[in-house]
Structures are given as structure tokens and as C-alpha cells.
Image: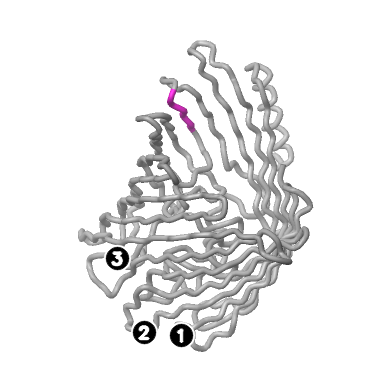
């Protein structure tokens, strides 16, 4: 078996040879590295709590040969790119046993530091028409805010067509992806349209998420016997960016059907929205500071039935390496799930679904430091057991020291306070330090 270093050298040599043979105009190299040491105390799972120390390395190395001329076309050119990703604990003795990290680890092709292919694509400019750019292969992709669809550093295999100037300033994308997840292949296909208004950018999208199944029933949020399912997502986003004020709002409707074991069917009817705003202003002593506000909500299930009303896309953005990312350094919440506190699909206690998220935060610069403080409140939308809806509150304090645009030191202290859904649980605490570099 080839070592990761030999495989990386071989890939580099092949790309350099291709660039030379094809008379490429430019070879771009990119690299990202994050080394992190973290300690979680009293993580909740079921009726118990446990701690987990974590030393992780998350690195990416990309090679893009740009400007390869296609001689048999009129003014067309292409880029060829390969991105290698490596994720894993920094030492073999650092065993990750907490179930809270199982989903993040399970999605990765390799979680022991062995490099895997995050991106392998061909991007063709002026594809069949001067206004069309086509990308084929495994590629990074995020739709709108990432609520419903994102590659999360894994890449999505498939194709994408970008249409410029469809009508006046209107732009459009068509996309088709076939990711592999939970031992089954999925089909994702749809379109998005961009319209730059007089002050902000409008984006509308619609796509299908089809799970062909494997013949074995599995559990969704409400249904415990799903063989296959098709979900449809329709979304609208508005982004406004001015000198002092920024706003980003997105709303999504989910519809679809599920094939259930025994020949029955189920329906999906759900919705979600996320509103985020920020105000920048010069503050004495600190300088140019920023206040951030966010509020989001998704629907949930009031009880059993043949219609699942819990908003739950399969490929929304929620992971970074071995950990979750999202609202709260500990919670890592999306609009529909949270760091696992049980073995349910959304990580919440059985029968609890949907999330309400409130975030108030501020970024305060002090010399070369940026001090950030965030307060979060998490509340469930529905509890089929007629119990409490109060999940938790969390506050995060983060200090970032910049040596330049490409090198940062980060330190975080976070406290997650369980509320009425977890009456006997202690506070969960996280302390971590990280160094991140890129070029």
C-alpha cells in the first residue's frame, strides 16, 4: 500500500506534468491547516455525562491548473483541480469515545489522518455557449446559507452549470449531485436563480433530494420504518450588504413523500427560516466593532401520524472535521438538530423536534486581538410527549490573534447550560486553543 506522502507526491507530479503538456497559463497551489486542542466536560448523552479531550488536525492541499486552452473550441478554456483533505486525531493515543462525535467521524472516508480526495473536477469556461461555465466532478458547493445543502469539506460528486446574463442581470445555476451517505447513494438535482436588486441580492432555489434506499428500513425523525424518500426544498434568500449594516435572511419550505416498510407511505410538510443581521460602528477604546443578531426557527412534530412536520434536510451544513459547526461552539446547532444528547436523528430527546435559535453577539477589536462574545438560546418547536420545550442556553467567549491575513491563533471558552429538557444535567464546558494557517 502506498503511503499518504507517496500518494500526495504522485498526484502533484501528475498535475505538474499535465500543466506542462497542456500549456496551462497558471498553476495555483492552496493550503489550509488547523491544529486544535480541545477539552469537553460533562457532555450529555441519555441519562449520563462524560468528558472528552480532543487533539485534532484538519488540513487541505489544493492544486488547480488554470487556463488550459481547448484548441478545437472557440475561446474556451478549462481548469483542472484536485483537493486533498486530511482529518484525524493528532495522536493514536487520543481515542475519541464520546458518541457526540460519531456522526462527524462516520461521514468521513478516513478519520485517522489518511488523505482523501475532497475535490477532483474539471471546470470549463464558455461551455457550448459564451455565457455558460460547467464544472464536472467532486466539488465544493454551498447553496445559499447552507441550511439545506452544503459539501462540508467532503465535496459533492456531480455537475453544475452556471448561466450568466440569462435575462439582463439575472443569473442561474443548474446542479446535479450523487453523494453517498448512510450506506446509500442519494440524488440531488435542482436550480437556483440570482437577481441583483437595487440594494441587495435575491436568490431563489428549488431542488429534489432523493434517497433510493437499500431495501432495509431505517429511522427518520418521525417515521421508524423508511425504505426510501424524496424531499423537495424551495427557498428564498435576500442578502443586503452596506457600509455599516448587513442582513441575510432565508426561508425554506420542505415537501415530499416516504416509502415505508409494509407498503405504506408518509408525507413531509415542514418549513424553516433564518434571519441574521449585523451593525458595525466605531466604539471608543475598541475601535470598529460589530454587533450581531440572529433568529431562526424550524417546524416540528406535535405527535405521531402519517405526516412528518419536522424540517430535516440530509445534507445541510453542520460539520467541520471531527466536530460539529453551527450556532454555539458546544451545541453546533443547525435549524433542525444539535450535538447528540440521544440516539435520535436530530440528537434531541425522543419525541422532540424542530429548533428555535436566538443569537446575540459582538466582535470587539483590541490592538491585534479580536474578542468575540456570543449568547445563544435554544428551544424546541414541538414535544410529542407534552413536556418542556426548553433545551439550553450557551455563551461563548473567543479571542483571535492575527499574525496576518493567513495565520491566526484562537482560544475559546464556552458554557452550555441545560434547561428543563435535561433537569438533572450539569453544565457542559468547552475550552480549546487552535492555530490556523492558509495560503
Q: Secondary structure at mark 1?
A: loop
Q: Report the residue at 39% width, 56% height from top.
A: 313
Q: Secondary structure at mark 3?
A: loop
Q: CA distance from mark 1 to mark 3?
A: 23 Å
Residue 277, horizontal then vertical, whole percent? 50, 60
**Label 3 crowd (10 A; few <14 / some 14-19 / many >=20):** many
Among the two numbered marks 2 and 3 on one chain, the one whose residue lies closer to the N terminus? 3
Q: CA distance from mark 2 to mark 1?
A: 9 Å
Q: CA distance from mark 2 to mark 3?
A: 18 Å
Q: Which colour style is shown?
A: one colour
The magenta segment is 131-136
> Left or right of 412: which side holds 261?
left
Residue 133, horizontal then vertical, whole percent? 47, 28
> Left or right of 329: which side holds 438?
right
Among the two numbered marks 1 and 3 on one chain, the one whose residue lies closer to the N terminus? 3
Per the image, the residue denoted by label 1 is 420
Per the image, the residue denoted by label 2 is 387
Q: Quadrant of the N terminus?
A: top right
Q: Nearer the viewer, residue 189 or 26?
A: 26
**Label 1 crowd (10 A; few <14 / some 14-19 / many >=20):** few
Per the image, the residue denoted by label 3 is 309
Q: Report the residue at 50% width, 25% height from top.
A: 124
Task: Tell me, yes or no, whether the two marked residues, 2 and 1, touch with CB atoms within 8 Å.
Answer: yes
Amino acid at each position: 500500500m502506498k503511503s499518504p506522502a507517496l500518494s500526495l507526491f504522485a498526484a502533484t507530479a501528475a498535475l505538474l506534468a499535465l500543466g506542462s503538456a497542456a500549456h496551462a497559463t497558471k498553476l495555483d497551489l492552496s493550503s489550509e491547516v488547523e491544529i486544535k486542542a480541545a477539552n469537553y466536560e460533562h457532555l450529555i448523552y441519555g441519562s449520563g455525562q462524560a468528558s472528552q479531550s480532543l487533539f485534532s488536525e484538519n488540513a487541505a492541499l489544493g492544486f488547480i491548473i488554470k487556463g488550459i486552452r481547448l484548441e478545437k473550441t472557440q475561446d474556451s478554456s478549462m481548469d483542472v483541480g484536485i483537493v486533498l483533505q486530511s482529518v484525524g486525531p493528532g495522536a493514536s493515543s487520543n481515542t475519541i469515545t464520546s458518541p457526540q462525535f460519531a456522526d462527524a467521524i462516520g461521514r468521513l472516508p478516513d478519520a485517522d489522518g489518511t488523505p482523501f480526495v475532497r475535490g477532483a473536477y474539471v471546470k470549463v469556461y464558455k461551455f457550448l455557449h459564451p455565457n455558460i461555465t460547467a464544472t464536472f466532478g467532486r466539488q465544493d458547493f454551498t447553496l445559499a446559507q447552507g441550511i439545506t445543502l452544503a459539501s462540508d469539506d467532503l465535496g459533492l460528486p456531480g455537475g453544475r452549470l452556471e448561466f450568466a446574463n440569462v435575462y439582463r442581470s439575472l443569473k442561474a445555476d443548474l446542479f446535479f449531485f450523487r453523494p453517498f451517505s448512510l450506506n446509500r447513494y442519494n440524488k440531488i438535482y435542482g436550480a437556483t436563480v440570482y437577481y441583483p436588486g437595487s440594494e441587495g441580492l435575491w436568490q431563489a432555489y428549488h431542488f429534489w433530494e432523493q434517497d433510493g434506499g437499500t431495501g432495509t428500513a431505517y429511522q427518520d425523525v418521525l417515521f421508524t420504518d423508511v425504505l426510501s424518500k424524496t424531499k423537495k426544498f424551495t427557498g428564498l434568500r435576500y442578502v443586503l450588504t452596506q457600509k455599516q449594516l448587513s442582513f441575510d435572511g432565508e426561508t425554506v419550505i420542505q415537501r415530499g413523500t416516504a416509502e415505508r416498510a409494509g407498503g405504506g407511505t408518509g408525507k413531509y410538510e415542514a418549513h424553516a427560516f433564518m434571519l441574521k443581521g449585523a451593525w458595525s460602528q466605531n466604539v471608543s477604546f475598541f475601535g470598529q466593532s460589530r454587533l450581531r443578531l440572529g433568529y431562526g426557527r424550524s417546524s416540528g412534530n406535535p405527535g405521531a401520524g402519517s405526516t412528518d412536520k419536522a424540517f430535516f434536510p440530509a445534507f445541510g451544513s453542520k460539520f467541520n472535521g471531527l466536530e460539529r459547526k453551527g450556532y454555539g461552539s458546544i451545541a453546533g446547532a443547525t435549524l433542525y438538530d444539535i450535538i447528540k444528547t440521544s440516539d435520535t436523528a436530530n440528537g434531541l430527546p425522543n419525541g422532540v423536534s424542530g429548533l428555535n435559535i436566538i443569537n446575540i453577539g459582538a466582535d470587539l477589536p483590541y490592538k491585534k486581538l479580536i474578542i468575540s462574545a456570543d449568547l445563544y438560546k435554544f428551544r424546541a418547536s414541538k414535544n410529542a410527549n407534552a413536556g418542556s420545550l426548553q433545551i439550553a442556553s450557551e455563551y461563548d467567549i473567543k479571542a483571535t490573534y492575527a499574525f496576518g491575513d493567513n495565520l491566526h491563533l484562537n482560544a475559546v471558552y464556552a458554557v452550555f447550560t441545560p434547561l428543563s429538557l435535561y433537569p438533572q444535567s450539569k453544565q457542559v464546558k468547552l475550552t480549546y486553543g487552535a492555530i490556523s494557517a492558509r495560503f
